[in-house]
Amino acid sequence: MDIDFLRQQAERCRRLAKGTDPFTEKRLLKLAEEYEVQIRAFEKRNSEPWSR
């Protein structure tokens, strides 16, 4: 997976969450956070000198 794809998906979830019912909003925001966790892990792996 590409980091730009993950960022786009997180942003899409946040955008879709606006104006939805509370349950759906909460779930979409949680999904966006899960994408952010993947992004941080991806960035961490790529910043470690031995990973190159």
Image: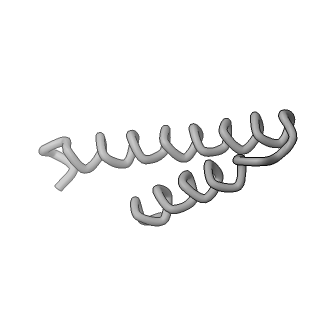
Residue at 49 percent across and 38 percent down: it is 37
In this picture, is 20 found above or below 52? above
Q: How many discs appear?
A: 0
Q: Is residue 24 left or right of residue 50?
A: right
Residue at 49 percent across and 42 percent down: it is 36
The percent position of residue 20, horizontal first and vertical second, equals 82, 46
Q: Is residue 51 left or right of residue 35?
A: left
The percent position of residue 5, horizontal first and vertical second, equals 48, 65
Q: Is residue 49 left or right of residue 11?
A: left
In this picture, is 23 found above or below 50? above
Q: Nearer the viewer, residue 36 or 20?
A: 20
Tell which residue pokes out farthest to the front in this image: 19
Which quadrant is the C terminus positioned in?
Answer: bottom left
Q: Is residue 10 left or right of residue 7?
A: right
Q: How is the image coloured?
A: one colour
The percent position of residue 6, horizontal first and vertical second, equals 49, 57
Tell which residue pokes out farthest to the left in this image: 49
Q: Nearer the viewer, residue 10 or 14?
A: 14
Residue 2, quarter of picture: bottom left
Residue at 42 percent across and 47 percent down: it is 39
Residue 23, quarter of picture: top right
Residue at 29 percent across and 40 percent down: it is 44
